[in-house]
Image: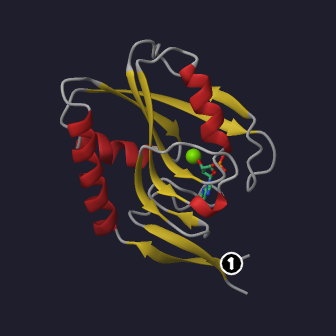
Amino acid sequence: MAEHVEVLLTEAEVDARIQEIGEQISRDYQGRQVHLICVLKGGSFFLCELAKRISVPVSLDFMSVSSYGSDTKSSGVVKIVKDLDESIKGKDVLVVEDIVDSGRTLSYLLEMLQDRGPASLRLCTLLDKPERRVVDVKVDYTGFQISDEFVVGYGLDYDQRYRNLPYIGIVKFDS
Ligand code: IMP
Ligand code: MG
């Protein structure tokens, strides 16, 4: 099926919001080092832009997860495809995600990371679709709350495409 993408949030709007979040994180973590954990692949574009705007010391690690079940409906059972390289014990961890949808993936992931004994554990997401929430997840930093639309760009994909769009767009299917 053919589709096209309509702009929801422009590059300038996304950049400006990431700047604000970066400043807020820098204030909140004053005097500490923040350990950013990027959830691949979607979180990678946001992580890079966010990290550049944080003024306290930053370290990074990456993990890749996949949910069992169909692509469009996550089951909440998460398989770790690539685990973190370093221990998070005693670190101030901030998980950086592209989007919180049902909340299943993140609630599973946060519980697993909490068991590894970080000093603190927070969640930062570029996008949040609160209407779609099935499992309660505490989000500490949100870029934008959006309505229930399928979005792409800035790391988010439709069938592995469109991650490289410098803006957030809505996928519209042509009939
Ligand atoms: P959750 O477990 O339902 O919160 O799943 C979140 C994951 O589903 C995200 O990390 C994305 O990979 C994917 N996802 C959810 N909504 C969208 C969307 O609108 N566009 C692209 N990917 C999405
Ligand atoms: Mg994701």
Quarter occupied by the N terminus: bottom right
Residue at (68% x, 84% y) in the render: 174
User: Is residue 160 shown to the viewer in this render?
Assistant: yes
Residue at (22% x, 26% y) in the render: 57
Name the residue nearer the viewer: 68 or 100: 100
Q: Position of residue 48 (x, y in %)?
A: 34, 43
Q: Is mark 1 within 8 Å of ligand 1?
A: no
Q: How is the image coloured?
A: secondary structure
Q: Amino acid at mark 1?
A: Ala
Name the residue nearer the viewer: 175 or 151: 151
Per the image, the residue denoted by label 1 is 2
Residue at (57% x, 57% y) in the render: 157
Give the secondary structure at mark 1: loop
Horizontal arrangement in the rendering, residue 78 relative to residue 93 (left or right): right
Q: Position of residue 15 (x, y in %)?
A: 29, 60
Residue at (24% x, 42% y) in the render: 52
Q: Position of residue 173 (x, y in %)?
A: 67, 79
Horizontal arrangement in the rendering, residue 25 relative to residue 121 (left or right): left
Name the residue nearer the viewer: 53 or 122: 122
Quarter occupied by the C terminus: bottom right
Q: Is residue 89 above or below residue 108?
A: above
Name the residue nearer the viewer: 144 or 87: 144
